Image (cartoon, rainbow, N blue to C red):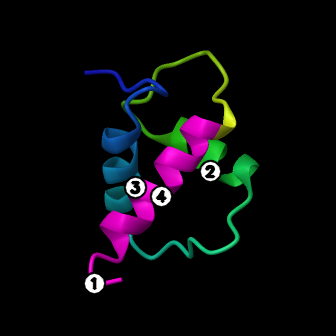
Amino acid sequence: MALQWKDYCEIADALNEAYPDMALTDMPDEELIRLVKSLPDFDDAGDPDETVLSAIWNRWVYVAYPEG
C-alpha cells in the first residue's frame, strides 16, 4: 500500500523503523519532508501542510520515546 501525507501514523511508524537513531529534536520541516519522501512506500506528489508535518513528527516522537 502506498503511503500518502494523510497516513501520518503509518508514515511515523515507517520513519521510526527506517531511522531508529535519528535525533528528533529541532528537526527542520525540510528534513522531515526529505525523510518521508525517501521512504520506499511513499507515493504522494503533493506538498504537506504544517498540520500534517506536526502530526507526523509528534507521532514519531511518541513511537520513538514511549516512556516519555
Q: Compare marks 1 and 3 and give the one earlier in the sequence.
A: 3
Checking the image for residue 67, the label placed there is 1
- The amino acid pointed to by label 3 is Arg
Crowdedness near tag 2: few (<14), some (14–19) or many (≥20) residues, C-alpha within 10 Å: some
Q: Is residue 7 above or below residue 24?
A: above
Please provide percent x and percent y for residue 25.
Answer: 62, 75
Give the mark nearer the N terminus: 1 vs 2: 2
Is residue 2 covered in magenta? no
**For residue 59, which numbered disc appears in the image?**
3
Precedes in sequence: disc 2 or disc 3: 2
- Against 56, residue 6 (above or below) is above
Labelled pair 3, 4 in contact (Cβ < 8 Å): yes
- How crowded is the residue under tag 1: few (<14 C-alpha within 10 Å), some, or many (20+)? few
Along the polypeptide, which appears first: circle 4 or circle 2? 2
Q: Which residues are magenta?
A: 51-68
Q: x and y percent of residue 60 in the render?
A: 42, 59
Give the SS element for disc 4.
helix
Residue at image position (37%, 26%) is: 3
Do we see residue 18 in this rendering?
yes
Question: What residue is shown with label 2?
Answer: 32
Please say if 13 is above or below 42. Answer: below
